[in-house]
Image: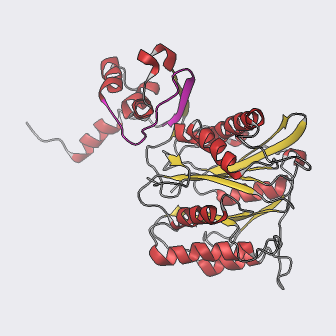
Amino acid sequence: MASLSKTSVWRRFSSTFTSKPTPSKTHLHAPIPDSAFPKGYVLTGIHAGVKKKPGVLDLAVILSTSSRPASAAACFTRNAFKAAPVVVSQQVLEQNQGRARALVVNSGCANAVTGKQGMEDAWAMVAATDALLEPNQGQKSQKETLVMSTGVIGQTLPISKILAGITSQSPKSVDSKSTLGSGFEAWERAARAFMTTDTFPKLRARTFSIRGKEYHLAGMDKGAGMIHPNMGPPSGQLHATLLGCILTDAAVVPKSLQSALTYAVDRSFNSISVDGDMSTNDTILVLANGAAAEGSAEIDEQADPEAFELFKQELTTFAIDLAQLVVRDGEGATKFVTVSVDLRRCSQGRIPYFYLRPRKDSTLRRRRELGTYPRRNRFYSSFSTSRSYSCLCFLHPCRRHSTTSSSR
């Protein structure tokens, strides 16, 4: 039998594949009223020169201006190779016992797998941003800035450009070009500075009430590829990139804020996937500056569980909204799929999450959704035979749980 030519083989292969155009996502971003954003924050996004294309925003600076101490919490990647910004932010939180007043983010370079130089650069970003803060009760030596980076892995930061960009936002600087603000334009600039392969800035805000007092939540995140997060709190062993930050003007005890965030992330960001690849930089941060809580004590899970539960649920639903934006913007994604499992119908309700998530990310399952893989026997078989040990937590047996993914 004559062998097939390369051209004929390619024609046979290409005839079985039809690419689908990615739907427009412009409707997912719209202006937000200034009144919807939390009080006591100023922020901006600028072009520092990390990205080569002129004018593209690549550096975000976020500062709390509240007179009250700001609580901070974070969930970081469990990837074995943790980027320098992840390590530095974890250390800042540990040193300050869950307090921080600022965040600096660069896109275009992940500062991952960069060794000693990467750590020094991340700490330099912290120091430069700390200098923008008003003195906090004489504690000038305290590090109060968290740092995040996203972009190309294995390259060092153009740190001189980044530090110059941060310094330019100081009103005390001789060549100050500060664009810090608190309205929608400032929030949108910061959200755009997070972006890498994202097609739109992922920004949301909402208002909520606890016992008649009005508070605000606003957040931004980024991610379109390398999305398969598995994040946890900064304490304990931590096993490019999804980044996100949520800001609120409520007052919350640091330990309680971390508890609420861990709960929210497990039900939002840790339940999404685009391509099954976990990043070295995945980080979700929350700042609570108490600017709208004058005369009110900080929300405490132990002292006031009712108020804490209300805040926790608001944070969780908000995190779910942000997480779904990442899935909808998945690289090449044409479908948005939610997998729901009612554990009350399962044997004894003890179905571990590591059985559910790999099935959501299965290539067989994704082809089934797109209508290109009709063999049901193999599809159902994948649910009963595969295991993943990436997550060891069990889902609550009395609740309905969902995981979300995108398909190409």
Question: Left of 63 or right of it: where is 242?
Answer: left
Q: In the picture, which quadrant includes the N terminus?
A: top left
Please identify the dominant SS of the magenta region. Answer: loop
Viewer-closest of 247 and 57: 247
| Residue 376 can be seen, yes or no | yes
Image-quadrant location for residue 59: bottom right
Look at 46% across and 72% down and name the residue there.
Answer: 114
The magenta span reads 386-408
Decide: is 323 above or below 143: above
Give the image location of residue 222, x and y in percent.
62, 51
Q: Is residue 193 magenta?
A: no
User: Farthest left residue?
Assistant: 1
Question: Left of 250 or right of it: where is 142?
Answer: left
Image-quadrant location for residue 376: top left
User: Farthest bottom residue?
Assistant: 174
Question: Left of 281 or right of it: where is 183?
Answer: right
Question: Left of 181 or right of it: where is 241?
Answer: left
Look at 48% across and 50% down and name the residue there.
Answer: 226
Viewer-closest of 234 and 193: 234
Look at 90% across and 46% down and name the residue there.
Answer: 35
